[in-house]
Amino acid sequence: MKNKNMWPLPLGGKWQLLSLGTAFIFSQSTFAMLNRKEVDRNGYSITIPFLDSQQLTITGTVKNTKNQPLAGVTIMPKNGTGSGTSTDENGKFSLRAAAGTTLIVKYVGYKEREVSVSDSRLLSIQLEEDVTAMDEVVVIGFGSQKKVNLTGAVATVKGDDLVRRPVTNAGSMLQGQVPGLRIIQNSGEPGSEGLTIRMRGQGTFSDAGNNPLVLVDGVEGNLSDVNPNDIENVSVLKDAASAAVYGSRAANGVILVTTKMGKAGRITVDYSANGSIHTPTKLFDLITNSAEYMELWNEAKVNNGINSGLYPQETIDLYRNATDRVQYPNTDWLDIMFNPAFVHQHNLGISGGSENTQYNLSLGYVDQPGVMKGFDYKRYNVRLNMTSKVADWLKIGANISAKQGDTKRPRQGAQDAFIATLSQAPTYAPQLPDGRYTFKAYDFEYNNKNLLAIVDNDVLWKNRDYSLNFQGWFDIKLTKGLNWYSKAALVGDFDNESDWRPVVPLYNYHTGEFATDLDVGGKGLGNTRRENRYTNVFSYLKYENIFADVHNLEVQAGYSQESNRQEYLYGYRRDYFNNNLKEIDAGGLAVQNSNGSAYEWALRSFFGRLTYNYKQRYLFEANLRYDGTSRMHPDTRWGAFPSVSAGWRVSEESFLKNANLNWLNNLKLRASYGKLGNQNINISVAGNNSYPYPYQEILNYTGNYSFDNTNLSTGAAQTALANQGLIWEETSVADIGADLTLFKGLDLTFDWYRKTTSDVLRQSQITGVVGLEAPNVNSGTMRNQGIELSLRYSNKIASGTFEGLSYSIGGNIDRFKNTVVKLGKQEIQEYTIREEGRPWDTFYMLEWVGIFQNEEQISNAPKQYNDDTKPGDLIFKDQNGDGIINDLDRTYMKGQFPSFEYALTGNVSWKNFDLSFMFQGVQGRNLFVNNWGTVPFVQGSPPTTEWRNRWTEENPSLTMPRIYWGFDAPAKIRRPSSYYLQNASYLRLKNLTIGYTIPTLVTNRIGINKVRVFVSGDNIFTKTDYPGLDPERSGSGTFLGYPQNKVYAFGLNVQF
Amino acid sequence: MKKIVIITVISLLACFIQGCDKNFLDRDPLDKLSSNQFWQTKQDFDMALTAIYGNLQTPMFSAGTPDWDLITDNGYGQHNSNGSQAIVRGDIFSSSDGYIRDVYKNCYAGIARVNIFLSKLGNYEGSAIDATVKKIYVGEASFMRAYYYYLLYTCYGDVPLVKEPLTLENQIQPKVPATEVLDFILNEVDEAIANLPNSLYKDAKGHLVKSSAQALKLRILLFIAYGQNGNVDLQIIQQAKNVATEIMQAGYQLSPQFESIFRSTTQEGNPEIIFSVKFLAPDNATSMDQWYGDWLVASPLKSFYDAFEANDKRRDQTVFVGQVDFNGTIHKPSNNVPTGYGLKKFLSPDLIPYGYSTQSEQDWVMFRYAEVLLSFAEAENELSGPTIAVHDAINSLRLRSGLGNLSKTLTKDEMRTAIRKERRMELAFEGFRYFDLKRWHIAEEVLNNVKDGILTYKFEDKFYKWPLPQTEIDRSQGVLIQNPSY
């Protein structure tokens, strides 16, 4: 923890315009230039009568580049005569010195400055953070390291770069920031964005999972629980060498989140807020004219061969010619259910401290209603970080945080809510004029539940979750170079769910007669209390020393243990007599139920690290982790995970230094290899798929039966085969990389890696004759091989019209190839295949090659299944050339994994203005999407307007087939084929922010250090061929998902 | 100071890590039993047996059985339950899902439960289970194995014959010839008949009795009595007649009211039921009323509706037109009624309106006396032509349905037609039709001539035996051989 207090980053500056990358490019001289201007403008410059060799009293203040006063800054005359002083907590100082003396101003973590006192007595001195490439420190596992000395693949992101986006989830903010870290936000659902985070491809096909380990201040946590404004920085450990100290849980990479700590000096109070308008990025364009809907309905049904349940012509005419649009509406259900939402967030931070004790207190609030009715999220965050040096040899600290999230959504979730909305005909409105909720206009119509009735009647799943995280630590200096660090953490997650299902009658839209009760999936009230308690204790010794000035050695050894217990309790009563009393006790006793259980797991680990470098030129590191898990049999539960890495800082070699290459500032080559483990496997027992006892032979209470029709007898049976021989799944990663700085402004990082996971923990491919669920086994190998490149160029214009304009532009790109190396037998799903030698879940389906135009073409073409093929139907390709089209003609299709992903970022600041943008893109990705939104009239859903161009005899379309009707559409149109495979590549302007800092001349007068206002837009522009909805979603399946948000925000940052 | 603090902390940590927490990594389930703690007491075996009965609640074997008629000329399944639409259209592949895949899977799951039970029972050395109890256990377990293997046999023909619990090591099993499977089935059912108590089902508190096993044997014999071309094997049909006669002497009677067989309030003690799968609301209920009364999972075809004779009371007891109507108690289905007809036979009048909160508890009647009478008549007619006994058996059903006696002048062939029709009407949507079409070998003739199906029917000769599921072939390392023509 040696750098905890030396962390060379500015505090609290969420408005900071410049990224880490740009910050250290700013040269001292340019700041001096700025300073001079500011001094001029603020009128600080006072001309002192020149009196040679006369002692002057010089007073002044020292501030950082954000105008925050710095306490404890040393000020010394350069010539060594006279005594120095240091600044008080307001950054003020006063000393006597001879005129013409040059003062040296020094402060840890800042660049030293020399100030001549010849012309100024009241000095305003600004210090620039000393963030040179040489000294930049990166948080790594159980410690930190100078960036230049890193031998592993580690990427960092500053908190200030994250909070630029006016979104609410810290995980979403990481999108596009780090090459190789791919984040897909599945939807814009408030509080439930459904993030998929994958480091360097899909590492395994085990249920043990692909999620990277997220550590918040060294303890496992959750990105969505963290207030993004609390994040100081994020380190992403990508290869085995850097992640190896977390061996047991690091196979999918590690994301280290470090939260902000106060700095010695004056109290800083930061307040920031933004309000934004959210709208869906994209929605279907549906046929909402009732008459047109009815005509298409009839056409589609007749095409299906169904001649019943058609709209009579009189009805169609009634709607077409109606003047009373209440009785004969053209209802646009999407318009009713989707509305712009006003979202606002507020953050208050108070930080500061003395030389020995620093603190940071922050409060956060997010109020995020959904763009879809019935969705709402509120989040409250509190955090207090404290650290104190209580003795020369002892430092202690605590990080305490709490989060409360209040989530509401229709009880069956976002996809179901969208399906229900889409599955409504325009022929009726959700309510009768008297407010009663409607079912249908005509009995033969099809639909799903009336979602407005769901929302208005509070048929919502409501959850209040608390996440509490307590961490306490000490750091004892045992002797010179030897420290002992320990931390204990207690993390509690508590869920408080309620599921309310009242009886809501629905009525026929035209007759007003009772039709049916609203589908609320049963009735009554179910309440669930869930808690997860996680404890983690770790402790390590660390020794560092430099021998003979050239041998830098660091040795570290430690122990960690984790345990987790999850519990739940569920209570239910069926009959409620008053819809306003929604607690269990208000329900009748006739039918009631309860469930509850608890599950535990534990891990115990030993770890060690040895770091050595010679003259910071030849770098070497080795790690070892030894882990035991409760998930495996005592005989096989321990696994060892070693790694080694090495680096060569070529630019430190004398032959290069002597060559005086001005353009080459830094060149490092590095390579690493190591192994990581994964044990996070559960078995599925009686519908619970997170039962953490994967090796045990378990008897389940199942198969209850009422022999006498009065009492229910309890049954017991073994439902899964056990395998006690489970061992750790192992991931080995080889990484070769280079870090390069050219022309003092161009940074380049490149990595090549090969990541191989073997002994994959998975369900065995057992035969059905066993009659039990498959046991977990170690079988299978998956490989991801890829490259990552990131570039950043920063510069500042020194003269001319745009003098002082600084900018940086950066980009990153990554690509990888996923291969299933060993699987066993191929597994074919509905539209994917798992097969050795191919990417996991490769698309596998019929190839759609056109539309039949006439009978002759059909009779000349291969027979397609047992279909009654007609003109307007899809033509499939006869892949095997056997003259018939059947399942054997399914073929492999690309696009399960994108070809590459990329991002482009830029920052510009000039005078008081700042601007930043981020483009993010995915190339070569396909999604298989079907049902609602693709097949017309599925559950009555209106066709999209594209269907106006469907194949008919009058309109022999080459791209759109004949229209068929809903779930009853014949197999010939519904069979998985590339007709449903959509190109989901996109390029998107993720964010554009423009800010303006009100001149300090103005703000200082009212006692405010700094005020910045900004406007920001998120997801404002997207280029894609993907039809209908947003291409950014986690995977294939039913077309519908809660939409992504387009956000326009206005915000404010104030610092007192 | 420094030393004191350090020593204190170290000793605390050491205690925490070592002494206090030696078994830190030993975590066992907190709400489930470990297998080696079980199989000790009679209660353990009773619970295991309960789970064996409980397995029959799998929809395919009980409350979802009406879906079997969706792959016949009786009805249409608009939700494609169990892959019925593809089967009707003749899109039957080894990769098919629905019945093609799930009959195999579900039957072997049932068999595994029985195999484990019998294996543990065989190894049991305690004194908690005496010979009488053990005998009944064996009888009940054997019935179950016979039932599951009978389904496998009728659907796939040759299948692996698993009689012991399998492990990862011996999980790959070859299929054995259908005749060997059949021998085992008959053996098991005889074992069941020999071991089960000789009482009426209504007196057996929900457990299997001897006549339940005899009814299963009768069903099996009748299935195998017809050869490849639908020709009768007189020897087998004679055996069938004998079993039927034995059951007819046991004391069962037709329930005076047809519908009372299917209503939860009148099932307990019903003299017609020979075995049923029991349900009990609210915690062990089904959604039958919602499925068939509100969602229209099964839609009888018009040709089926029209096949009832004019005065047949069963028509309106089996089928509703447009909406469910029990003497004015009406439920309007919330789903579409694609054929105009719905399945009323199994609905509960007292649970209207049907919806998501409807908890159905009518037992699924697996064997009833009417089937025995029909089977007897069929066997007797094949053996001796339309004797009085044949007429009596059929007429007793017709009487209950408000129909007159069959003409006494019917020839043997006419009687066969009459019996088959009677069987279709009486046992409609009880899961018989598909297997009757198969055993009589008239599936092509009947199914390919359905004119009012919403789907286009196609039945090929090879469908008499379904393909084995492709995943099973894939995982068997070449040991399991696919059925011909797939």
Image (cartoon, coloured by chain):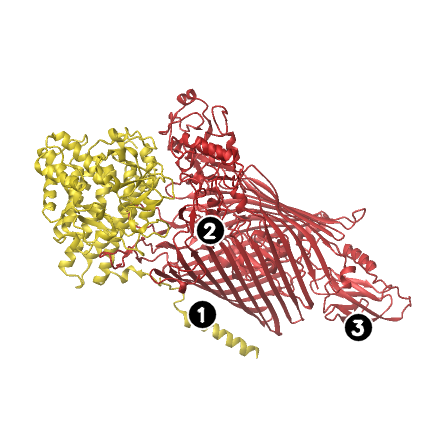
Chain colours: A red, B yellow
| Mark 2 or 3, nearer chain start | 3
Cβ–Cβ below 8 Å for labels 1 and 2?
A: no
Quadrant of the rendered structure where residue B123 is? bottom left
> Residue A290's spot in the image, x, y percent?
50, 36
Q: CA distance from mark 2 to mark 3?
A: 77 Å
Decide which of A328, A817 is in the foreground and name it: A328
Residue wearing tag 1: B17
Between marks 2 and 3 in the image, the one whose residue lies nearer the viewer: 2
Decide which of A726, B49 is in the foreground and name it: B49
Q: CA distance from mark 1 to mark 3?
A: 54 Å
| Residue B29 located left or right of residue A851 | left
> Residue A167's spot in the image, x, y percent?
59, 52
At 17% from the left and 33% from the top, the residue drawn is B418
Label 3, secondary structure: give it. Answer: loop
Label 2, secondary structure: give it. Answer: helix
Chain identity of mark 1 = B
Residue wearing tag 3: A83
Chain identity of mark 2 = A
Q: Amino acid at mark 2?
A: Ile
